Image: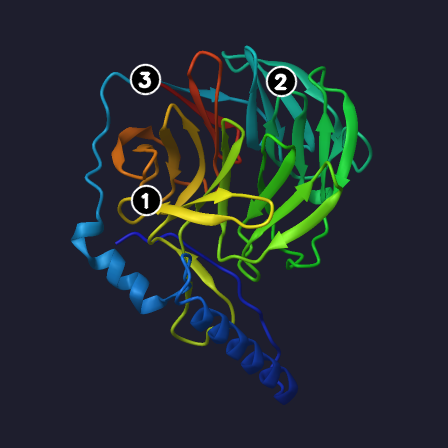
Amino acid sequence: MKRVIKMVLFLFLASTVLLTACQKTKSEYEQRAQESEGSSLPIAKEKEVDALLLDPRNTLDVKQKSGVISSELYVDGAKICGMVSLDKEILLADHENGQLLLMDSEGKIQERIGELGSGPLEFQKPTGITKDSQYIYVLDDGNSRVQILDYDLEYVREVKIDRTELDPSEELEDIEVDADQTIYISGCFLMNPGIIVLELKTGKESFQKINFCGFLACEQGKVYGLSSGQLYLPDEEPISFGEGTGECAVLECFPKDSRKIHKMQGINSFNDFLIKDKTMYCISQYHNELQKFDINGKYQGSIGMLDGESVLQYICEDEEGKLYVSGKSSRIFTFQE
């Protein structure tokens, strides 16, 4: 039985002092898991997650939809993360080389924007990209900031991200912006799960301490979150949370509070997703495919297979309705119904 698992563990040297610290940390995580039991996003016990996996009622009847045109594109030397559609071209975040790439629908690179560094239009390990009617927002993870560009791909300003609530090793993975230009940032924050919120109009930053690790999407000016899997507390020596295949939830995101609005059908583990015409297109890491759900989380079918080796994948749609899925490699999968 396949199970996708992400875990963060502390390694301690054998000494009485450090062993005490480990036990204290274990106790703190157990308390947080217990306090979450009545919430809409509970931290489960490992045996509860195992029971979900073994229950045949939770298994999706995976059937690939007919009439889907698919292909692969290659961007040599790049490791593509986030993507966003700009008219007839796709803007890509090259995580490996610290720059943005402007690609046409045939996979040809038309322009390279920026370079590795920390100044304006310089990037270190960029991940997510999004846009609104005015600007393009690039999640510059290695520099702990969001770079804001205009539609000529010129630098406008940047917003620094306070990461004191997060472990330094945790990566900022996804970004979205709502109709009020409030920025939401997510990732696999296992040590302190939640969502970073940056309000551009007020300059205020906050961290929503909710049991959420996952990705973000925007539909008609509203931001939504999709949990990557189920947060759980391991049975043996739990010194951190784990995240594995299980029950996944959809959130509606607000500056003050983000809340669960429904759960997804079946058991799964997801990467990025998008919403269009009351339909959710979700990258299933558990099934290694692009899956289609209705807006209430009911499974509609498989769009096509993906790269099973990719552990982090992003999705976007161009002006003609073609879907692009990247996976921190030079390969990009395309699908069109």
Say if mark 2 contacts mark 1, CB within 8 Å: no
* Residue labelled with disc 3: 337
User: How far from the left and from the top, in percent, is residue 254?
Assistant: 55, 43
* Residue labelled with disc 2: 102
| Secondary element at image label 1 | loop
Identify the mark nearer the N-term, 3 or 2: 2
Image point (72%, 25%), residue name? 149
Identify the mark nearer the N-term, 2 or 1: 2
Q: Say above or below: 89 vs 193.
A: above
Type of amino acid under label 3: Glu
Most foreground residue, 331 or 53: 53
User: How far from the left and from the top, in percent, is residue 261?
Assistant: 39, 45
User: How far from the left and from the top, in percent, is residue 84?
Assistant: 56, 24
Q: Is residue 284 visible?
A: yes
Quadrant hosting residue 276: top left
Q: Image check: 232 left or right of 123?
A: left
Type of amino acid under label 2: Leu
* Residue labelled with disc 1: 264
Q: Residue furthest right?
A: 119
| Secondary element at image label 2 | strand
